[in-house]
């Protein structure tokens, strides 16, 4: 079984985000594999161990993303592809992934339910549409039996069990797998694993960004004496307007 896992190169969740010249300021920011993508990668490695086959990781990014890709190789991927382009938007990224997947003969394409920088949650659906195969998200459990995937996915108010024949695209989230911490053997082997760099396919710009800004700071907090619930009700009704 050939599995393609698409990973993002995103700021660590503890990073302080700033903007300079109307663009994200990457100075001093630590980057990681997108957390949802790491769940997808961990499950792909488990499926490879159970059924055999290979796991390829793919990232759309410039050379600065290669340490993140090497970490994915250390976790257990067999090889990697870096599409040499800055990820502009979901449509651009999906077009690059689909171009690779069309010739790769992959049985399963996994990625996170969304990236944690833009949180669009669009790429899996766009890739599936370009390839003419199903897209299922967000999945919390994934097993393969006889060429059929059995999954549990989150829906509003509960969970849903679904089945789908291979190939398809899946957007993953916890608790589909436990995160895997690279061991020393994995880190050493990652240095010699193949990382292919390919040029991007041409895509018409469908999205133009205007400005970037941080959210407005939180307002002052008003303290209400516990012995005066009437004041709290008045504030909630007249100022917060939630009652």
Image (cartoon, helix red, strand yellow):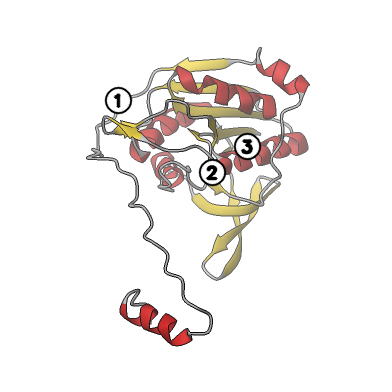
Please provide percent x and percent y for residue 151. Answer: 63, 55
Indicate left or right for 19 with 221 as reference: left
- Is residue 76 shown to the viewer in this render? no
- Please tell me whether mark 2 or mark 1 is closer to you in this view: 2
6 or 104: nearer the viewer:
6
- Badge 2, how many Cα within 10 Å: few under 14, some, many 20+? many
Please provide percent x and percent y for residue 130. Answer: 39, 40
Image quadrant where one finds the N terminus: top right
SS assignment at label 3 = helix
- Please tell me whether mark 3 or mark 1 is closer to you in this view: 3
Please provide percent x and percent y for residue 112. Answer: 53, 43
Q: Residue furthest bottom?
A: 230
Please provide percent x and percent y for residue 227. Answer: 53, 84
Q: Which mark is residue 112?
A: 2
127 or 21: nearer the viewer:
21
- Badge 3, how many Cα within 10 Å: few under 14, some, many 20+? many
Task: Write the residue at 29% across / 30% down.
Answer: 203
The residue wearing badge 3 is 41
The residue wearing badge 1 is 202
180 or 238: nearer the viewer:
238
- Is residue 119 shown to the viewer in this render? yes
Task: Write the residue at 72% across / 28% down.
Answer: 182
Q: CA distance from mark 3 to mark 1?
A: 28 Å
Q: Earlier in the sequence, mark 2 or mark 3?
A: 3
Q: Earlier in the sequence, mark 3 or mark 1?
A: 3
Indicate left or right for 7 with 204 as reference: right
């Amino acid at each position: 079984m050939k599995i393609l896992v698409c990973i993002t190169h995103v700021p660590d969740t503890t990073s302080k985000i700033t903007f300079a010249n109307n663009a994200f300021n990457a100075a001093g920011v630590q980057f990681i594999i997108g957390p949802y993508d790491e769940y997808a990668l961990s499950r792909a490695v488990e499926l490879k161990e159970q059924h055999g086959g290979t796991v390829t990781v793919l990232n759309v990014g410039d050379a600065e993303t290669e340490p993140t890709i090497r970490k994915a190789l250390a976790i257990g991927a067999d090889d990697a592809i870096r599409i040499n382009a800055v990820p502009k938007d979901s449509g651009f990224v999906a077009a690059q992934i689909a171009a690779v997947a069309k010739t790769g003969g992959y049985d399963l394409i996994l990625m996170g339910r969304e990236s944690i920088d833009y949180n669009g949650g669009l790429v899996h659906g766009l890739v599936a549409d370009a390839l003419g195969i199903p897209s299922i998200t967000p999945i919390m459990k994934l097993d393969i039996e006889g060429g059929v995937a059995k999954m549990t996915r989150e829906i509003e108010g509960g969970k849903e069990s679904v089945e789908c024949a291979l190939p398809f695209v899946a957007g993953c989230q916890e608790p589909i797998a436990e995160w895997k911490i690279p061991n020393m053997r994995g880190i050493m082997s990652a240095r010699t694993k193949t990382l292919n760099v390919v040029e991007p396919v041409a895509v018409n710009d469908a999205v133009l960004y205007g400005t970037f800004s941080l959210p407005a700071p939180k307002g002052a907090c008003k303290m209400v004496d516990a012995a005066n619930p009437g004041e709290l009700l008045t504030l909630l009704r007249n100022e917060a307007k939630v009652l």
